Amino acid sequence: MRCPFCTSENTKVIDSRSKQDGFVIRRRRVCDECGSRFTTYEEIGDLLPMVIKKDLRREQFNRQKIIHGLQQACQKRPISIEVIESIASDIEHHLMQSSEREINSRQIGEEVMKRLQDMDQIAYVRFASVYREFRDIEEFMDELKGLLNKPVPLGLEDTENVASPTSEPTT
Ligand SMILES: [Zn+2]
């Protein structure tokens, strides 16, 4: 993106946020040459890869779906909507920076899980149980065992919820 003041191509993004259901992204940029700051609006459809669904249909990336899935996984967990939205934005930005034209919906699920795993183990397992579509209970238990062997952060000791994920598949 060229600087509108000095036409230098050395500009960098200092802030990105999406507006209007996530279809337009507003980017704050700074020019390395003259130090000017300016704002651009870009269509997300131009920047985000198409999502390949399980049945191989393609659809536009939709951050609301990530937020919805996270809200279900984080029910009754000490995680605010701001945190959930920041995870969705983080993934969105990550996808925009990748040059992929298409991405598997499963990869998006993995990105969500990576971020949840460090944050809240119960929400993580709930989300994983839906998105990873564990092929059998053994696989699920392996995942659980791996988690239970890790030190549990303070405030996450009510592990009885782990065995009964309440989330429904979202797609
Ligand atoms: Zn400039």
Image (cartoon, grey):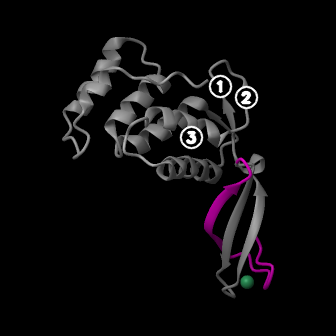
User: Are the residues flagged by discs 3 and 1 in contact, CB closer than 8 Å?
Assistant: no
When the figure is inspected, residue 118 is found, relative to residue 32, above or below; the finding is above
Residue occupying image coordinates x 65% and y 51%:
96
The magenta span reads 1-21
When the figure is inspected, residue 60 is found, relative to residue 78, above or below; the finding is above
Query: N-terminal of the two: label 3 or label 2?
Result: 2
Q: Position of 119 compared to 100: left or right?
A: left
Q: Position of 66 compared to 52: left or right?
A: left
Numbered label attached to residue 58: 2
Residue kind at label 1, given as amino acid type: Lys
Considering the numbered disc 2 on the image, is that residue within a helix, a strand or a loop?
A: strand
Numbered label attached to residue 138: none
Q: Please state which of the two labelled residues, at mark 3 or mark 1, is closer to the viewer.
A: 3
Q: Where does the C terminus fall, quadrant-wise? A: top right
Query: Rounded to the nearest whole Å, what is the CA distance between mark 3 and mark 2?
Result: 20 Å
When the figure is inspected, residue 50 is found, relative to residue 30, above or below; the finding is above
Place of residue 90 in the rendered image (x, y in percent of width and height, measured from the top left)? 54, 52
- Which quadrant of the view contains residue 29? bottom right
User: Are the residues flagged by discs 1 and 2 in contact, CB closer than 8 Å?
Assistant: yes
Residue kind at label 2, given as amino acid type: Arg
Q: Please state which of the two labelled residues, at mark 3 or mark 2, is closer to the viewer.
A: 3
Place of residue 107 in the rendered image (x, y in percent of width and height, measured from the top left)? 54, 34
The residue singled out by tag 1 in the image is: 53
Query: Rounded to the nearest whole Å, what is the CA distance between mark 3 and mark 1?
Result: 17 Å
Place of residue 8 in the rendered image (x, y in percent of width and height, measured from the top left)? 75, 80
| Residue 137 shows in this picture | yes
Query: N-terminal of the two: label 3 or label 1?
Result: 1
Ligand 1 is within 8 Å of the C-beta of the residue at disc 3: no
User: Are the residues flagged by discs 3 and 2 in contact, CB closer than 8 Å?
Assistant: no
The local crowd at label 1, few if under 14, some if 14 to 19, many if 20 or more residues have their Cα within 10 Å, is some
Numbered label attached to residue 67: 3
Residue kind at label 3, given as amino acid type: Ile
